[in-house]
Image (tube, grey):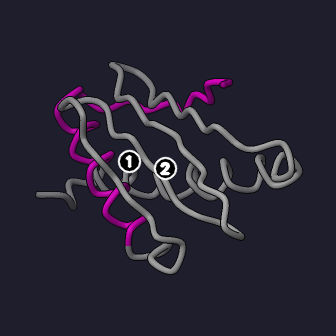
């Protein structure tokens, strides 16, 4: 599983809050894909959803200067891997920007 790095310039607690908000937003956006998010530590969430009867699993770990995104994509979905990562990254960056502007609580 390859790790995709999403840079941020937030302090660690604010980055964790932004990641939590992003994970919640994924739940609303991807509800029809049986999306699940499980925080296994305060800095790591395991994500999963279903597409065409196949389960896709991943994780996002909050680090001091980046979010590490891992996505385990079955072979038949590899052509869509970059699109999935792009969607997740865009949502995370949106919440990072809201955090930077002081819009999170």
Q: Spot the residue most to the bottom.
A: 32
- Disc 1 and disc 2 in contact, CB within 8 angstroms: yes
Vertical order, 103 against 81 (above or below): below
Left or right of 41 in this view: 91: right
Q: Residue at 35% across / 21% down in the picture?
A: 63
SS state under label 2: helix
Q: Secondary structure at mark 1?
A: helix
Residue at 86 percent of width and 51 percent of height: 76
Relative to residue 68, is residue 48 depicted above or below? below
Q: State the residue position of label 1.
A: 96
Where residue 26 appears, x then y in whole percent?
A: 43, 64
In the image, 39: left or right of 50? left
Residue at position x 81%, y 52% from top? 77
The tag on residue 93 is 2
What segment carries the magenta color? Answer: 1-27
| 60 drawn magenta | no
């Amino acid at each position: 599983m390859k790790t995709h790095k999403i840079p941020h310039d937030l302090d660690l607690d604010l980055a964790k809050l932004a990641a939590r908000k992003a994970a919640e937003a994924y739940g609303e956006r991807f509800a029809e894909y049986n999306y699940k998010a499980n925080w296994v530590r305060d800095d790591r969430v395991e994500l999963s959803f279903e597409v065409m009867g196949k389960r896709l699993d991943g994780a996002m770990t909050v680090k001091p200067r980046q979010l590490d995104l891992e996505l385990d994509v079955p072979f038949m979905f590899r052509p869509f891997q970059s699109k999935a990562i792009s969607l997740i990254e865009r949502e995370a960056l949106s919440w990072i920007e809201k955090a930077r502007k002081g819009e999170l609580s």
